[in-house]
Image: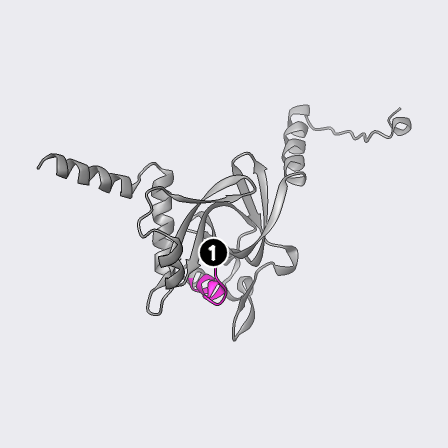
């Protein structure tokens, strides 16, 4: 009957609940909205972080330094992003670029071969975007202390975003890790900026 009606049919010896859960997970990923983003996608302190920015600011070099500090690479240059549910974006590396990081002046580096298995990740959930800018861009387009957390829309999901100015002498890797630690606190409900505003208001009220 299925052949006549051209309806796919399969059978399994597994329980129906197990088969349904497996199919739901597979189909949600197979039919998920997807896009490709330019940047370096990493596991930094357990958080999925996309490093983006203007050309020539050293995103891949920053990625290499973060890897040397014990963080993990998911993808460099092109990152495949999938919306696996209403609030979650998952990032993966295209098969062609797996384990590879391109550094200007050196070429392609096989991160897995150089740093070992623990230096690469197969996939991560995107939780934070770190955007690198030059000084003039920061002064022109962004507030020094934004009143509300910045976000960027990715496949219809707002993703937290921080902007870091790149100038000679700044340790960008340390700043990125600090931004990640601060974002982890915010995800736990601890907002340092709002606590500062409340402290300032209490101080003004007591005068």
The N terminus appears in which quarter of the rendering?
Answer: top right
Q: Is residue 34 left or right of residue 8?
A: left
Question: In the image as oriented, which residue stretches furthest toward the front?
Answer: 140
Is 62 magenta? The answer is yes
**Residue 203 in the image: x percent, y percent?**
13, 39
The C terminus appears in which quarter of the rendering?
Answer: top left
Image: 82 above or below 133: above
Residue occupying the point 36% across, 66% down: 167
Residue under circle 1?
51
Q: Is residue 7 left or right of residue 101?
A: right
> Where on the picture, by quarter, is residue 205?
top left
Image: 171 above or below 147: below
Which range is magenta?
A: 53-65
> Callout 1: helix, strand or loop?
strand
Image: 169 above or below 143: below
Is 72 magenta? The answer is no
């Amino acid at each position: 009957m299925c052949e006549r009606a051209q309806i796919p049919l399969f059978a399994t010896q597994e329980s129906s609940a197990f088969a349904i859960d497996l199919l739901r997970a597979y189909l949600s990923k197979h039919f998920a909205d997807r896009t490709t983003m330019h940047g370096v996608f990493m596991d930094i302190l357990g958080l999925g972080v996309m490093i983006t920015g203007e050309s020539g600011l050293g995103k891949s070099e920053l990625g290499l330094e973060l890897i040397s500090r014990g963080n993990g690479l998911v993808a460099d240059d092109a990152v495949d992003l999938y919306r696996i549910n209403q609030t979650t974006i998952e990032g993966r590396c295209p098969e062609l670029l797996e384990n590879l990081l391109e550094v200007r002046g050196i070429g392609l580096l096989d991160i897995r071969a150089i740093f070992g298995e623990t230096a690469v990740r197969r996939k991560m959930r995107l939780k934070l975007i770190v955007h690198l800018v030059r000084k003039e861009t920061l002064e022109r387009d962004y507030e020094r202390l934004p009143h509300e957390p910045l976000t960027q829309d990715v496949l219809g999901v707002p993703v937290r975003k921080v902007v870091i100015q790149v100038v000679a002498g700044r340790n960008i890797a340390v700043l990125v890790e600090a931004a990640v630690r601060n974002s982890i606190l915010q995800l736990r409900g601890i907002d340092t900026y709002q606590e500062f505003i409340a402290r300032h208001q209490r101080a003004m009220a007591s005068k």
